[in-house]
């Protein structure tokens, strides 16, 4: 699932905090690709750190989509380019993927991978001259689900201040998944938990409930984006999440992209531009 349409251009004026370090030794740009945070071939990430960065420079962590079974960090490269060009540090991660019919890699292993990647970054934060808190997570599709779930349930260090999502699955029960393609439900959802999909009235068994960001224990500010005509993940998934966040008095915004598909395709250009600006403003706000 390539998610290039919405954030391909970020035509906004930079409003980052001005670096007051005239007398310091200049900090050079640092780009590290395919850095291993674990022994598996998929446990890699790319690091893009801006010139003259400080511990106040925003940092965005990108989590690609791909149905929990495919995709690569290069699929989120459009977002990396937009952020980096606007003075934002970026960590773009890969994680282990599930394989249909093969046990072993499910959401808990993916959560462990994200956590290991964050440990690697935090251990080197002083050396790299980057912040150690108020990270912004961005994810699309399956990456949106993983970003929300990690922020809400697995961020034990409380380093995440905001999650931005596109087309996020948030609650795995039959009623909430109405509108999704039956083939996607039967083929993809078992990859998340390792258990067969159950669409009966008792659906919310513990495995799927625990894998649902909607039932997160530590909800955080969230910027939810969803295509009006998304036929892969129903827009109701983000609507429900937004309603719950409001009930809990957690800051959120919900943007339904008119005519937009799962990756935001077919959204009017003027809507995309307004969205880009709003998203950027939230990144700045929650990096302070």
Image (cartoon, helix red, strand yellow):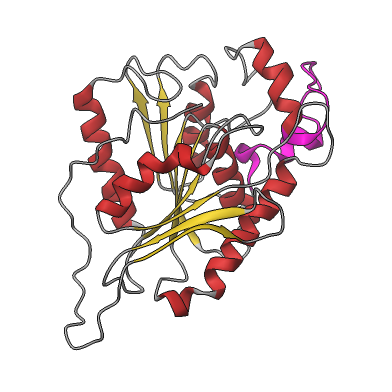
262 left or right, relative to 149: left
For the view shown, which residue lies furthest in the bottom direction?
Answer: 23
Q: Nearer the viewer, residue 49 or 162?
A: 49
User: Does residue 193 lie above or below 34 as drawn?
Assistant: above
Rendered location of residue 186, percent (x, y): 73, 17
Q: In the displayed structure, does residue 120 sit left or right of residue 39?
A: left
Q: How many marks?
A: 0
Q: Which residues lie in the magenta part?
A: 192-216
Q: Residue at x 38, y 31 (%)?
A: 4
Residue at x 54%, y 70% (from the top left corner): 122
Say if 17 sits above or below 127 in the image.
above
The reply to whether the magenta stretch includes residue 202 is yes
* Residue 30 in picture, x, y percent from top left: 37, 67
The kind of secondary structure the magenta stretch mainly shows is: loop
- For the residue pair 230 and 90, the one nearer the viewer reads as 90
Q: Tell me where residue 77 sits by quadrant.
A: top left
Residue 265 shown in magenta:
no
Q: Is 287 situated above or below 197?
A: below
Q: Position of residue 208 (x, y in %)?
A: 74, 33
């Amino acid at each position: 699932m390539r998610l290039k349409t919405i954030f391909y251009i970020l035509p906004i004026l930079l409003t980052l905090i001005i670096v007051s370090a005239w007398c310091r030794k200049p900090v050079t740009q640092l780009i590290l690709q395919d850095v291993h945070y674990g022994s598996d071939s998929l446990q890699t990430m790319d690091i893009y750190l801006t010139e003259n960065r400080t511990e106040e420079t925003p940092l965005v962590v990108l989590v690609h989509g791909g149905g929990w079974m495919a995709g690569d960090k290069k699929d989120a490269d459009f977002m990396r380019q937009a952020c980096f060009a606007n003075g934002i540090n970026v960590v773009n991660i890969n994680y282990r993927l599930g394989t249909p019919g093969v046990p072993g890699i499910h959401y808990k292993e993916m959560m462990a991978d994200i956590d290991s990647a964050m440990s690697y970054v935090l251990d080197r934060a002083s050396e790299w001259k980057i912040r150690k808190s108020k990270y912004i997570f961005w994810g699309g599709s399956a990456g949106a689900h993983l970003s929300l779930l990690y922020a809400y349930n697995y961020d034990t260090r409380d380093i995440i201040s905001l999650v931005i999502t596109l087309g996020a699955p948030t609650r795995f029960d039959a009623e909430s998944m109405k509108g999704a393609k039956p083939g996607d439900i039967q083929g993809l959802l078992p990859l998340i938990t390792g258990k067969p999909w159950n669409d009966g009235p008792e659906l919310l068994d513990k495995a799927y409930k625990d894998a649902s960001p909607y039932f997160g224990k530590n909800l955080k500010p969230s910027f939810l984006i969803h295509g009006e005509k998304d036929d892969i993940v129903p827009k109701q998934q983000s609507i429900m999440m937004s309603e719950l966040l409001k009930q809990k008095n957690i800051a959120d915004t919900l943007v339904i992209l008119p005519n937009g598909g799962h990756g935001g395709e077919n959204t009017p250009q003027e809507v995309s531009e307004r969205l880009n600006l709003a998203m950027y403003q939230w990144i700045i706000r929650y990096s302070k």
